[in-house]
Amino acid sequence: MKGIRLAIVLAMIIAFLPAISVYAESGMVRVKVAGQFGGNLYSSETGNNLNVATGFALGAEALFGVLPWLQVGGGVEYQFLRGVSFQGVSGGNLQFVPIYGILRVPYKLGSIEPYAIARAGYAFYSGDSTFTDNGLISLSGGFYFTIGGGIAYRLGGFAIFAEANYALDDGSESVVGVNTNVSYTKVDVSAGVSVPF
């Protein structure tokens, strides 16, 4: 399954690279701050859903127009550590840091621009010493994916935007040679600013 997801990400990047050089319009850099709510960490080994506390993230993205209705690019997001609990008992703090490719479909209405957006890439997975049981649990990253939409408001040379996404971070945990796949799902609400280049 991870191989299929990685193939999708690579196919997205490869498919649009020629278009960037042929049809490139001006690009933009976006900086955002996000609140991430309703998080659950699902373990394939135990079938348990661990509650993940609300967290915050900072992100930076670069986008290029390849067609009037399509932008592609890439980005990185730093998700700050957030608490994990099961049946009210704290289990330490976890963190994902994804790097990803982006597809953005804007619909320009003057200075207002609603858009759909999808991201896919790889998320690095880590946790504090309580979460990893002082290093006894080894963590590895995995597939990252978001899908959602937003609205941008252009103010002269830059724009402000607000966005909502469903987000998935996959990873794996290894304890004494036993591997477990985990999936962290959440609702991501962000706001930020974009500047053309």
Image: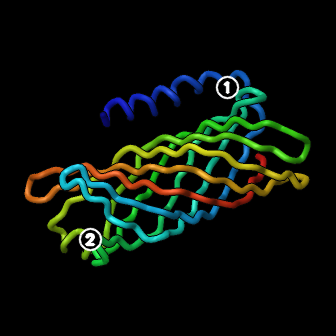
Location of residue 38 in the rendering, given as x and y in whole percent from the top left corner? 48, 63
Q: Is residue 77 above or below residue 19?
A: below
Labels 2 and 1: the sequence-earlier one: 1
- Seen in the image, is 187 located left or right of residue 117? left
Location of residue 44 in the rendering, given as x and y in whole percent from the top left corner? 24, 49
Residue under pointer 2? 131
Please tell me which residue lies in front, 12 or 149.
Answer: 149
Please tell me which residue lies in front, 52 or 80.
Answer: 52
Helix or strand or loop: what does disc 1 sit on? helix
Residue under pointer 1? 21
Identify the residue at horizontal 46%, vertical 33% (top origin): 9
Location of residue 184 in the rendering, given as x and y in whole percent from the top left corner? 39, 55
Identify the residue at horizontal 57%, vertical 40% (top origin): 118
Q: Residue furthest front?
A: 87
Q: Amino acid at mark 1?
A: Ser
- Seen in the image, is 182 located left or right of residue 107? left
Q: Amino acid at mark 2?
A: Phe
